[in-house]
Image (cartoon, rainbow, N blue to C red):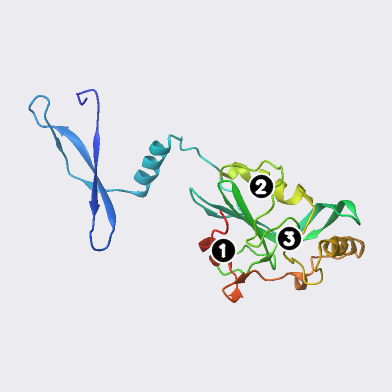
Amino acid sequence: MLNQEIKAQALLAYHHTKTDRLDFTVHPVIETGNKGMFALGAGRAFSEDDKENLIDILLNIDSDIEFIDLRILVKSRQMLVWYNPPQKAEISFNSPAYTGNVDTLIPGLIFIATPGNLRCYSYKGKSRPTPDTKLYWAPLGNMYEDGSFCTGNCETPKENSIASIPVWERFVLECTNTHSGNVQVLKSATTFEQMVDFYQVLKSGGAKSFPAKELLPMPCKNSHQTLRDALRNRGNE
């Protein structure tokens, strides 16, 4: 019930029947001078901040402040995208021929997280990826055709907050690789056992960087998939 102790604003929606565009204006609700009577004041355009605040109210969530990690490429309510440059990682394998960890080099990785789902790709070079960066299979096991992973009995984040990044990275880099997921992720390795051998040779050979020539491109309608393509296509989510 409106009274002098309660301030109110009204939201008006405008639907264009030809373009299907939906716009909003915000109006203060003001007293008219007659007891119990109110009117709408002058409206203003609905801002991006207004949209965020309205969504927070509808979802019953607080607008927490998050410090932005420099590796983040995209941050939205439904998607978080970040990257890691080439690095060393301890990859765990479980195969008939070898079970154990291999401390090895891996290429740069791009992660695309949406609630409850993660896709991971590799890329060439060390620079910060751009929308036109070409994507390659992440040279890891347990992978499906869209770049997502078999989760097995692992618990994965249900949200795509910045705080979930370390959990997702541990899921990708610290889970045991047990199979190839029916996809070939390295040019010289057509089986999972050959992939295990590849990493053992890479470690023992004293390589200074991951051999980029081994990366296989992610397909996209008979062309080479880019980061822009991957963001448009949400895989099997």
Measured in 3D between alpha carbons, the distance from the residue under mark 2 to the one under mark 1, in whole angstroms, is 18 Å
Q: Position of residue 3 (x, y in %)?
A: 19, 24
Q: Position of residue 7 (x, y in %)?
A: 24, 29
Measured in 3D between alpha carbons, the distance from the residue under mark 1 to the one under mark 3, in whole angstroms, is 20 Å
- The answer to which of 78 and 39 lies nearer the viewer is 78
Q: Are marks 3 and 2 in contact (CB under 8 Å)?
A: no
Residue in the image at 34% along x and 44% along y: 50
- Mark identifier at residue 86: 3
Residue in the image at 51% along x and 39% along y: 65
Q: Is residue 213 above or below residue 175?
A: below
* Figure quadrant of residue 71: bottom right
- Mark identifier at residue 230: 1
Residue in the image at 81% along x and 68% along y: 189
Measured in 3D between alpha carbons, the distance from the residue under mark 3 to the one under mark 2, in whole angstroms, is 17 Å
Residue in the image at 66% along x and 47% along y: 168
As drawn, is 79 to the left or to the right of 198?
A: left
Which element is circle 3 on? loop
Q: Is residue 183 above or below residue 93?
A: below
> Which of label 1 and label 3 is nearer to you?
1
Query: How crowded is the residue under tag 3: few (<14 C-alpha within 10 Å), some, or many (20+)?
Result: some
Closer to the N terminus: mark 1 or mark 3?
3
Q: Amino acid at mark 2?
A: Trp
Q: Amino acid at mark 3?
A: Pro
Q: Position of residue 40 (x, y in %)?
A: 16, 39
Q: Is residue 60 above or below residue 189?
A: above
Which element is circle 2 on? helix
Closer to the N terminus: mark 2 or mark 1?
2
Which element is circle 1 on? helix
Q: Residue furthest bottom?
A: 222
Q: Amino acid at mark 1?
A: Ala
